[in-house]
Image: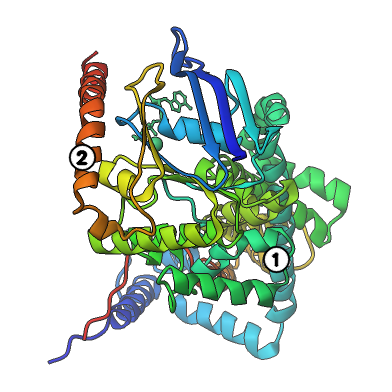
Amino acid sequence: MKKPPIWFWQIALLVMIFIIWHIATSPDLIPPIFFDNEYRAAFFFGEPAKIFNAIWVWFMSGEIYPHLWVTLQETLLAFAIGTLLGLAVGLWLGLTPLASAILDPYIKAMNAMPRVILAPIFMVWFGLGIWSKVALGVTLVFFIVFFNVYQGVKEVSPVVLNNARMLGANASQLLRYVYLPSATSWVFSSLHTSVGMAFVGAVVGEYLGSAKGVGYLIHQAEGAFDINTVFAGILVLTVFALLLDFVVTFAENKLLKWRPQQAETETT
Amino acid sequence: MATALSLTNISVTFTGKSGGGGYTAIKDTTLNIADGEFVSIVGPTGCGKSTLLNIGAGLLKASSGEVKVFGEPLIGLNQQAGYMFQSESLMPWRSALANVTAGLQFRGVEATEAARQGEQWLERVGLNGFGNRYPHELSGGMRKRAALAQMLILDPKIMLMDEPFSALDIQTRQLMENELLQLWETDKKSVVFITHDLEEAISLSDRVIVLAAGPATHPIGEFAIDLPRPRDVAEIRMTPRFLELHAQIWHAMKEEVLKGYAQTKNKVVA
Ligand SMILES: Nc1ncnc2c1ncn2[C@@H]1O[C@H](COP(=O)(O)OP(=O)(O)OP(=O)(O)O)[C@@H](O)[C@H]1O
Ligand SMILES: [Mg+2]
């Protein structure tokens, strides 16, 4: 007999989790174990059937799309701006030792600062629209990309560098054909983390104050003690993040073909 | 004959980063390579061969002494020279073809023309069909050959080669050596060829220079190789004159090799 593929088990596990969740939270299936009241479990943990119903209604009525769209926009903008800034500053500081020596403590301090605290300040600066969320995401993405690019510039093989110089590369060609490709490979290795951070920035920003976005939906539902809608929002966000991650993996495989990986062989 | 590359009274002292005084790798070395001459440099490991080549390439500034290229004092990089490095020097993010054509690209040669020449050079070094492989998909020897093509495509007047063929098997190596000799005989470039293989040095060169063991290395012997040209590197090794030269140079080197080995060993113990 053929063994079922791995995704079969993954799906089976997911179904299992929902079934157990359902059984444990339904008021009338089993007697309450931890709670003195059969409705308590549902109050704290929601009920899968109602959660899926909420999601169903969101997508059928189309109510969710504008919110998803806003969250996606914020994520992508934060990612793009943060990456470009990180790339530029990382290249600059990587190539100018004096500037990097002077700025070193400031960068360490800014990176150590818990940036979620900045969210209210960004709201004052950029308003309740998407830009305050983008700003929060940028502060998160920037440092990841920056540190990776900085490292990438420092770790360009001196032999490769000298070889390019001997082949006649001038300063700007070195930047474009040696430092940049080397740094981009480091950016890509941090891509999963930085896309994730852009997403976190967007959702947290929405959660703390906005009129649109999935984070906002969750915040509203929490205000109404509507636990099922809260979980519905979380599920939607999770699937959304997973999809983003797939896209990243795809882009990575396309763009980093040159990187040595575990050698792959064909069996005949 | 004109002098292509001349190093006069070169000394190199590396600053000691881990405390203590600096390390003098090269002391008072004078070296002249004539235009069109093929010179090999042999010497025990760690004596300063690569360092000397870096000086000639302009990648490293000598602590004292003078470098001249075709009579002109060298400022900055040596534009007349191609350099084949001892360690991996290909850009890992570029395919073999893109690596070979890099120099042309830096000079602004149009892309299709560069690719055409690149394909030609890949074929000459026996890499046709491997143009779109990335360096990590090539064998060590293939990478060396790509690096050779990368240097030769620019047609440099002076070729600085740091143990270029040491990663190759003996057959491929002799093929490449013959190819190099042919290239060199057709347009008489000046070659500074570093190797630790004395047979390779003798069979290729007009002159073999033996360096002393470090620190403070300097040439301790210079041998003109009066073997007839054109040569076939495999056949020339059988001739009596070759064996005679080999015995002579080996005798001069032996002491230095043992010295160099003893020093490396002591360094590790100390
Ligand atoms: N950047 C550096 N800083 C300090 N010491 C150095 C540096 N580069 C080389 N050296 C030292 O100078 C000496 C000569 O090094 P070099 O690389 O020129 O040797 P080599 O003759 O090419 O050896 P091999 O045959 O093993 O390649 C060595 O003792 C080495 O430790
Ligand atoms: Mg060396």
Q: Quadrant for ligand 2? A: top left
Q: Quadrant of residue B47?
A: top left
Residue B241 lies in quadrant? top left
Residue B185 % position (x, y): 48, 59
Are both tags, 2 and 1, on one chain? no
Residue at point 19% right, 36% down? B247
User: Compared to B230, does A10 lie above or below?
Assistant: below
Crowding at mark 1 (Cα within 10 Å: few <14, some 14-19, many 20+): some
The residue that mark 2 highlights is B244
Could you tell me residue B192's position as x and y percent? 47, 42
Classify mark 1 as within 8 Å of ligand 1 or not, answering yes or no. no
Which residue of the protein is positioned furthest toward the left in this rendering?
A: A1
Q: Nearer the viewer, residue A97 or B243?
A: B243
Q: Quadrant of the C terminus of chain A?
A: bottom left
For the question of whether residue B105 can be seen, the reply is yes
Q: Residue at x 30, y 39 (%)?
A: B196
| Rendered location of residue B252, percent (x, y) | 25, 26
Query: Nearest the camera: B6 or B121?
Result: B6
Query: Badge 2, how many Cα within 10 Å: few under 14, some, many 20+?
Result: few
Question: Disc 1 designates what residue?
Answer: A76
The image shows residue A154, relative to residue A142, as above or below, that is above
Q: Quadrant of the N terminus of chain A?
A: bottom left
Give the percent coordinates (x, y) of residue B72.
71, 34
Q: Pointer 2 indicates a residue of which chain?
A: B
